[in-house]
Image (cartoon, rainbow, N blue to C red):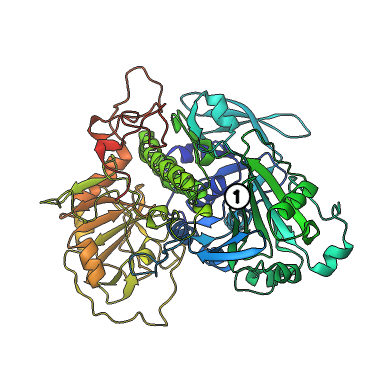
Amino acid sequence: MPTGPATGPLAQATAEAAPTVVLIVGAGPTGLTLACDLARRGVPARVIEQSDTLFPGARGKGIQPRTREIFDDLGIGPAIARFGGPYPLMQRWRGRQRLEEWDMLDRAEPDEGSPYRETWMVPQWRTQEVLYERLRELGGRVEFRTRLTDFHQDAHGVSATLARPSGPDETVRAAYVIAADGGRSTVRRLTGVAMRGHTVDPMPILVADVRIAASRDAASAPASDPASDTGATVTPASDQAGAAGPADETAGPGGAEAEGSEWLTAARIDRDHWHVWSEDQDGSTALCPLAGTDTFQFLAQFDDPDAVPDTTPDAVRRLLAERTSLPASAVRDVLWASEFRPRAAMAERFRIGRVFLLGDAAHVHSPAGGQGLNTSVQDAYNLGWKLEQVLRHGAHESLLDTYEEERLPIAAEVLGLSTRLHRGRPLDEAGGGVRMGSDTHQLTLSYAGGWLAVDRRAPRPAPDSDALRPGDRAPNARCVDAAGKEFTVFDALQGPHFTLLDFRTAHDLPDAPTPPDRPAPQSEPSATTSPTSATATSATALTTAVGPPTPPEPTPAHHHDQAPLRHIVIRHASAHARQRYGNAVFLIRPDGYIGLITDDPSDVPDYLTRIRRGRPATTVPGADHGAAPHAAGGATPGAGRDATGGADRTVERASGAPASR
């Protein structure tokens, strides 16, 4: 919920009645996440998508714990929980013979610091539908069948040409353009930025979403019923849940019996396992039940690098029958199908003047480890609050340089992880195979060492300690504020604001359970809990403010065009909170990462002023604005070894700090 009048370029755009401030090209998970974040911040964005509908496939189905935390903040956490489910155990087969089962994941119970500790399965089409509905709730929309064909930028904005199947082209003016249009990004191509990378695996893979028919239906239905086959064409995602309506919400693993269960029972293909055939001479095969649906994801790898998988419905049926214990007639619907060759690649730059590359437009991953969609969502979450600072609160636009500074090294590290997992072939190994552990959860990825990470503690913790550092994700913790109300750190963080947590006078909190009638966290501050604006000049206001209950109530308002700030003085903290946060003051950014740690609250206005004024000009003289910035401490992206595993580009963390810990 935006607070206060806009004072930056947005105010000028509003005065001039400019309809577009941010143009988002692409309505996948990346573009929709950014659109939702900007909408709740009061930053107008126009979203265009060249397809007729949202992407129809289940492709990016793994939602990592950090992404679930972000979705909670955006207000879609309950829907993601309702429409998804845990990953099933793996079940290995040899033809029709059932062999051993194993767990591909290292599972852990949620704890106080992390409410989510394992990967959650939600088909990508469903994640997009949830984001799309949230965007509509926030007043946004998507313009389908609209594509960007050209643009040019100047010192004041970007002029973009949009085309539709009918009617004349349209020229729009925007402050910034966001490339969220996938691995074959038109926007990236028009910028001239190269995509550097390598093939992770030369063997092609067919992926398809299929619905298995009951045996009585399979006996009478033709193998290629045009009324049910969609092949690789676009299918409305809402149709994929079947005609049963809301009942499908429980049809995932452990839910209601799926249609086609007679065939599944006969072949012993249950919905409680991810079924794998790894000994076929033509390539490995997997059949994964998609949580929250009555469908399966069918994956078939070909051991011939020159093979060209046939994605037509009949061909998918035949291939599934050849590779599994099901007959071709059991496949009632092929809802979506495609083929790909796993590749790891990254753009040389993520910012080009007023154009930003996000998601697959900036980095392309192997599907192993479920990192691609999650890294893309976090690109959007990193950029959203920075655009608000510039467009609504008058921050210097060099703040936007930190998007590339922070996200490019993260993308490089995650690309390296997904490549290692793919080459470990986790679907082919039982027991001793590659397992996906906490390193895939993205909870330990950090922006430490970057320009926005400031440590004013004296003395500072030793570099090899496990103490929180500026740039780290702020962990959850149970606390009691100065008014005696219990809350959690994540309660306080929810919403588009900075959060100031003062632990200097915190005492131990008795280890008592949270009261059952405690109000649920709010995704946005209500009228009675809206955050205040922090003055950049009055340290007294910050040091004397009384901490609010949860959801935190406002301290006295200070009329200033700085970002909204929620300030909480901690009276009691749990043992976990004391161990993680100690007795310092923490200023947490709107994306949940620690910006400042200090012993003196008077450092807070200085930090906020730092954001408003922007980073010093440290780009190479003569370079266009948005060239890859020098990292803090003089390190420059492009100075270390390529984390994707290739030899054609190099990346280094700012100040040499690792991207995860």
In the depicted structure, whether residue 613 falls above or below residue 531: above
Task: Confirm whether residue 86 shows in the render.
Answer: no
Q: Amino acid at mark 1?
A: Ser
* Residue 264 shows in the view: yes
Residue 640 at x, y percent in the picture: 31, 31
The residue at 53%/65% (across/down) is 100
- In the figure, 218 relative to 629: above or below? below
At 71% from the left edge and 40% from the top edge, which residue is drawn? 145
Residue 174: name its quadrant. Answer: top right
Provide residue 414's location: percent of width, then percent of height: 42, 44
Q: Which residue is mark 1?
A: 284
Badge 1: residue crowd in 10 Å (few <14, some 14–19, many ≥20) = many
Reply above or below: 80 against 363. below
Between 414 and 28, the residue placed more toward the observer is: 414
Please indicate whether residue 88 sits to the left or right of residue 232 in the image: left
Kindly identify the residue that appears in the image at 78 percent across and 56 percent down.
Answer: 328
